[in-house]
Image (cartoon, grey):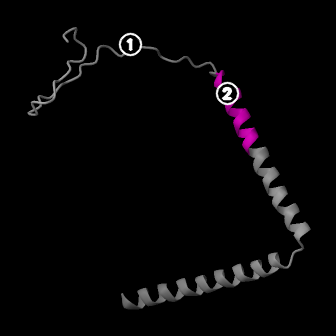
Amino acid sequence: MKKIRKSFWSAYWKLHDKKKMLVSRLKGYLDGLPPKTRKRIVLTMLAAFAMLALYTFGKAVYDIGRNDGRQLVKDHAGQVELSIKPENNHNVIPHLYGTDEE
């Protein structure tokens, strides 16, 4: 059991170190880019996000009125009984919902 745990943690730390190395390489590459290129990358990402957001919103609005041949079932829920638990607090007057008593 101890061997399995040890091998698991050693594999975990190896992956962790690889991830750190890749992140540092990527960070170094991106820090070396000129500001104009960085701005283009950010604006391209923003434009892609805006296009996808507008598409999602437009598709949702378009689909609001469509029912694809399905009909909603409209049934009356019936009368709902609201139970009132008696309070031991004498300062509170319980209101009886659904009755004409005041």
**Residue 61 belongs to the span the image colors magenta:** yes
Q: Do the residues labelled 1 and 2 touch (CB within 8 Å)?
A: no
Please determine whether, in this image, residue 98 is positioned above or below residue 5: above
Residues rendered magenta in the picture: 53-66
Residue that sits furthest to the top in the current view = 100
Comparing 100 with 82, the one in front is 100
Residue 99 image-quadrant placement:
top left
Q: Please give the name of the residue rendered at 46% of the width and 14% of the height, measured from the top-left corner.
A: 74
Say above or below: 57 vs 42. above
Q: In this view, does 92 lie above or below 49?
A: above
Q: Is mark 1 on a helix, strand or loop?
A: loop
Residue 46 spot, x, y in % from top left: 79, 53
Q: Residues within 10 Å of mark 1 (few under 14, many from 20)?
A: few
The quadrant the C terminus occupies is top left
Residue 44 in the image, given as x and y percentages of width and height? 84, 56
How far across and how far down the image is residue 18, in percent? 65, 84
Estimate the spatial distance between the alpha carbons at disc 1 and disc 2, rounded to whole Å: 26 Å
> Which SS class for mark 2?
helix
**Relative to 54, residue 95 above or below:** above
Q: In the drawing, does residue 3 fall left or right of residue 50?
A: left
Would residue 89 be found to the left or right of residue 63 on screen? left
- For label 1, the residue is 76
Amino acid type of disc 2?
Asp
Upstream in sequence: badge 1 or badge 2: 2
Give coordinates of residue 16: x percent, y percent. Answer: 59, 82
Q: Is the magenta stretch mostly helix, strand or loop?
A: helix
The residue tagged 2 is 63
